[in-house]
């Protein structure tokens, strides 16, 4: 019976696997569009899933002139934990390279302790080189920076990497950190440019991290320039000899803190640099000093754009005027992703945007302030790191999974006929309302720490605090006093106060929160909170955001399962196994029942 049971199970397993592979339950990534409500766009644009099945995607790089065949590489995607993926024209995904460095995070994302790993990628089509930057742990478990160069097919690149060359010696005398590691890179005019953070460690910070940024004896806090073989270039401003272990031979510019955006356009270099409380975008020149000295004041000096407060500026890209990707006025602009802090409570809007701005190459000045092009408005943790302009749209790689556990590269296209239903001008999501109504000026939400005049708005603290107040005899006595008043707003809110008292548990807290947002004095004459001019619908949106339902068990299990097995084809194997087992048990049960009757 055991052998027969196993044979039946095996047959059913392969039948189900065949069905799942050729007629999958979600044959297109688009079929579950629930994720779309988490994104708000400029009017006239649409957003779609281009490819999915990644694990912490951190950067994207397009092949400048891809081949025409369906299996020719179109773009590369870095996965933070060490895989380089290549996506072909027909959207097949291959592993280009993996297992070339060691890194085990002390904490996993969304904690900032999990930020290290593969960070930057840039391509040299003339030689078929693929450069990646990363932080790794050496044989002594010391965290260090490095660059790897992979050989590939010149021009069109390949699905698998050839030989690898590591530029280890450049960074061998200095460690990295769990916060400010090596960052983006770009090939320009036959040279490789790399941005490197100052090595600040938020876990165990030193007093003089910024001094590394200023010193010519350190590669940290710098923009480096080298040959495509990792050698110093004599035209570098501080070059003295060809010693690969001498930092000054590679330095192009000094004075950076955490430069995580780098773009060279027409000989102009632009860098996005993260500060303690403010961020900046600046144009960088040969031998320049960009003045990071440990203070926010130094960050705001001699910059193009300053973000106050900081938004976590990351990758930069530029869309030329002579393009058909986007129409004017979206062409001829810079696009810049803002990741925020990955462990910042999702109930904030700091970061998690893509902004655009205009720059005049004639006057070397920004001619329009940054404005939002795309915003993440979801309720789960998210951070926007990977971003690149492709031949048919803007591609982004949210580093964390969606609320359903999937992880994807998204594509934004100009498509007025099929415009995304959630636009920036209509974005009345709770995070946007909280920010636009000035709530963060008085309150703390998550770990943002923006306001301290009002009470903390974290859900657990809010529910506990409000529940205690509403359940007290003192509150009931106060309501009776207010019900006798004929002045406003107390007279108009008698029914609302009665509604609060008539409910219990979480519904009581929600009801009170809604009316408190609409009229802070409805049950408290001493309230110092100003009336925000919020309507009933907006108040309900904010209330459900601040006092949410706990996710049901089925949703949590589904999310954890998809996070554990991100590749859809591998999930099919698991589905087929369990479905096969269940169907087999059913068949065997029916078979036994029939035999007993005989």
Image (cartoon, rainbow, N blue to C red):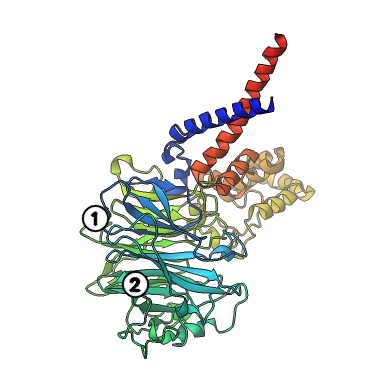
Crowd class of label 1 (few under 14; some 14 to 19; many from 20; radius 10 Å): few
The residue at the point 54 percent across, 41 percent down is 571
Give the mark count: 2
Up/down of 241 relative to 13, above or below: below
Name the outermost residue toward the front. Answer: 3
User: Farthest residue toward the top?
Assistant: 598
Q: Residue at x 53, y 44 (%)?
A: 404
Q: In this view, does 473 lie above or below 592?
A: below
Q: Which numbered disc covers residue 487?
A: none
Say whether residue 118 is left or right of residue 394.
Answer: right
Residue at the farthest left position: 322
Nearest to the eye among marks 2 and 1: give it: 2
Q: In this view, does 499 lie to the left or right of 281?
A: right
Seen in the picture, residue 228 relative to 236 is either above or below; the reply is: above
Write the residue at 52% across / 60% down: 81
Where residue 303 appears, x then y in whole percent? Answer: 37, 76
Disc 1 marks which residue? 328
The residue carrying mark 2 is 270
Mark 1 secondary-structure assignment:
loop
């Amino acid at each position: 019976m055991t052998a027969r049971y196993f044979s039946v199970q095996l047959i059913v397993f392969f039948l189900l696997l065949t069905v799942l592979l050729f007629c999958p339950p979600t044959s297109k990534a688009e079929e579950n569009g629930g994720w779309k409500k988490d994104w708000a766009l400029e009017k006239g644009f649409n957003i779609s899933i281009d490819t999915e099945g990644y694990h912490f995607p951190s950067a994207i790089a397009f092949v400048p002139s891809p081949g025409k065949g369906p299996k020719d590489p179109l773009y590369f995607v870095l996965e933070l934990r060490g895989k380089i993926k290549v996506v072909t024209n027909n959207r097949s995904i291959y592993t280009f390279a993996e297992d070339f460095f060691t890194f085990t995070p002390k904490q996993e994302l969304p904690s900032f302790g999990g930020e290290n790993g593969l960070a930057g990628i840039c391509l040299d089509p003339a030689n078929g080189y693929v450069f990646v930057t990363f932080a790794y742990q050496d044989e002594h478990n010391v965290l260090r920076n490095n660059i790897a160069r992979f050989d590939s097919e010149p021009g069109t690149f390949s699905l698998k990497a050839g030989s690898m060359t590591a530029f280890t010696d450049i960074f061998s005398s200095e460690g990295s950190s769990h916060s400010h590691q090596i960052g983006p890179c770009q090939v320009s005019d036959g040279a490789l440019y790399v941005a490197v953070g100052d090595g600040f460690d938020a876990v165990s910070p030193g007093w003089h991290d910024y001094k590394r940024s200023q010193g010519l004896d350190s590669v940290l806090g710098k923009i480096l320039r080298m040959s495509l073989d990792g050698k110093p270039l004599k035209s570098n401003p501080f070059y003295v000899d060809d010693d690969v272990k001498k930092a000054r031979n590679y330095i192009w510019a000094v004075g950076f803190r955490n430069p995580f955006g780098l773009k060279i356009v027409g000989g102009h270099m632009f860098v996005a640099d993260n500060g303690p409380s403010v961020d900046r975008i600046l144009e960088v020149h040969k031998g320049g000093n960009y003045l990071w000295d440990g203070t926010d004041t130094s960050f705001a000096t001699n910059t193009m754009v300053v973000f106050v407060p900081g938004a976590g500026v990351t990758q930069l890209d530029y869309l030329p005027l002579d393009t058909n990707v986007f129409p004017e006025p979206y062409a001829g602009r810079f696009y810049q992703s803002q990741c925020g802090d990955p462990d910042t409570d999702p109930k904030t809007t700091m970061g998690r945007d893509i902004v655009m701005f205009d720059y005049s190459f004639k006057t070397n000045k920004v001619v329009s302030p940054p404005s939002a092009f795309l915003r993440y408005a979801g309720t789960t943790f998210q951070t926007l790191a990977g971003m690149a302009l492709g031949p048919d749209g803007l591609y982004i790689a949210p580093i964390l999974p969606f609320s359903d556990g999937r992880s994807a590269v998204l594509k934004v296209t100009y498509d007025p006929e099929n415009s995304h239903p959630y636009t920036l001008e209509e974005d009345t999501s709770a995070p946007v309302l909280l920010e636009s109504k000035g709530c963060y000026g008085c309150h703390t939400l998550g770990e943002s720490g923006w306001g301290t005049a009002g009470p903390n708005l974290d859900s657990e603290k809010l529910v506990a605090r409000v529940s205690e107040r509403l359940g007290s005899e003192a509150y009931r006595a106060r309501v009776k006093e207010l019900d006798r008043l004929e002045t406003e707003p107390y007279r108009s809110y008698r029914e609302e106060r009665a509604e609060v008292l008539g409910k219990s548990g979480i519904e009581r807290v929600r009801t009170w929160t809604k009316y408190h947002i609409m009229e802070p004095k409805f049950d408290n004459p001493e309230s110092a909170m100003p009336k925000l001019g919020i309507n009933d619908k907006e108040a309900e949106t904010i209330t459900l955001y601040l006092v949410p339902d706990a996710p049901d068990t089925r949703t949590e299990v589904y999310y954890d399962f998809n996070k554990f097995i991100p590749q859809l084809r591998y999930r099919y194997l698991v589905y087929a196994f369990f479905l096969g087992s269940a169907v087999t048990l059913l068949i065997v049960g029916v078979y036994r029942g029939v035999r007993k009757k005989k």
